[in-house]
Image (cartoon, rainbow, N blue to C red):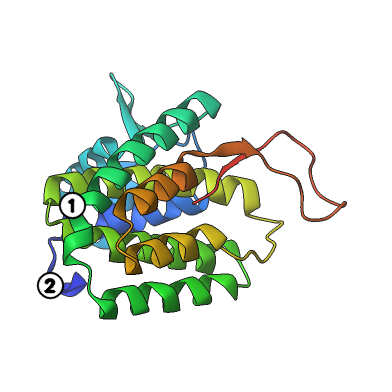
């Protein structure tokens, strides 16, 4: 594994900016200014532009002619597209990963799910949720597929943060446990179907408390 410190500066800039966009620290529609970012990271414009192109591939930024890059907007149509793509691609990855899943990997995935159940905020839950999916999908040994899934998970995280940023509630992920139970029993197709339903479902989010903004928000379940 390549350590973050050993990665090109453009990769580091892209990771940090992606985290800010996903968490909502940088809002949709905001221009990404090369000068400011180059100064912040103590580098030239070249790696900053490379980082912007990475964000563009991830669907987090877009290049407007004569105006430069800005953070992309998102809507329910995009959420549905992301959910359907994840349902298809993650179930494909799991089908190929299943023969390579060890008891050790499944035990780690179960431990990560327990961490998610105890998460006190949306950021910790999202980190645990993404780690669960990565653990059970990585053994598919299909790097291009995994990169695409990673980009889709980042897009899902944007909706998750937008929906739950100020009103998080603790949740128990029964789907994760059902997937693990099926994998332990060798029921690969049932595990894939459960995963597809899990990441493919979207719906209106009900607020956890009464004193919140009641604007219409949607969430994706995993």
Tell me if residue 95 comes above or below residue 104 in the rendering.
above
Regarding mark 1 in the picture, which secondary structure is present there? helix
Q: Residue at x 13, y 65 (%)?
A: 7
- Seen from the viewer's position, the closer of residues 117 and 92 is 92
Q: Residue at x 25, y 41 (%)?
A: 52
Residue 200 location in percent, x, y? 46, 39
Of callouts 2 and 1, the N-terminal one = 2
Image quarter where the N terminus lies is: bottom left
Tell me if residue 142 comes above or below residue 177 in the rendering.
above
Disc 2 and disc 1 in contact, CB within 8 angstroms = no
Q: Which residue is mark 1?
A: 96
Q: Quadrant for residue 181, please give it.
A: bottom left
Cα–Cα span, label 2 and label 1: 22 Å
Q: Residue at x 68, y 60 (%)?
A: 168
Residue 130 location in percent, x, y? 39, 60
Circle nearer the viewer, 2 or 1: 1
Regarding mark 2 in the picture, which secondary structure is present there? loop
- Seen from the viewer's position, the closer of residues 200 and 118 is 200
Q: Residues within 10 Å of mark 1 (few under 14, many from 20)?
A: some
Mark number displayed over residue 1 = 2
| Tally of numbered tags | 2
Name of the residue lying farthest toward the right = 210
**Residue 21 makes an appearance in the image:** no
């Amino acid at each position: 594994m390549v350590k973050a410190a050993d990665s090109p500066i453009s990769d580091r800039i892209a990771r940090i900016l992606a985290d800010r966009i996903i968490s909502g620290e940088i809002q949709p529609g905001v221009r990404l200014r090369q000068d400011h970012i180059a100064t912040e990271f103590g580098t030239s414009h070249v790696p900053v532009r490379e980082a912007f192109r990475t964000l563009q591939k991830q669907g987090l930024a877009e290049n407007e002619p004569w105006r430069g890059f800005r953070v992309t907007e998102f809507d329910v149509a995009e959420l549905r597209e992301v959910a359907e793509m994840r349902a298809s691609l993650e179930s494909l990855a799991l089908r190929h990963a299943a023969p390579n899943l060890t008891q050790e990997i499944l035990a780690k995935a179960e431990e990560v799910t327990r961490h998610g159940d105890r998460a006190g905020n949306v950021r910790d839950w999202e980190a645990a949720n993404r780690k669960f999916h990565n653990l059970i999908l990585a053994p598919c040994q299909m790097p291009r597929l995994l990169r695409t899934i990673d980009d889709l998970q980042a897009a899902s995280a944007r909706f998750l943060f937008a929906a739950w940023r100020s009103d998080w509630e603790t949740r128990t992920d029964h789907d994760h446990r059902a997937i693990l139970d099926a994998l332990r029993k060798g029921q690969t197709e049932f595990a894939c179907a459960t995963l597809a339903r899990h990441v493919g479902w979207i719906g209106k989010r009900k607020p956890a408390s009464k004193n919140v903004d009641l604007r219409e928000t949607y969430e994706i379940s995993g």
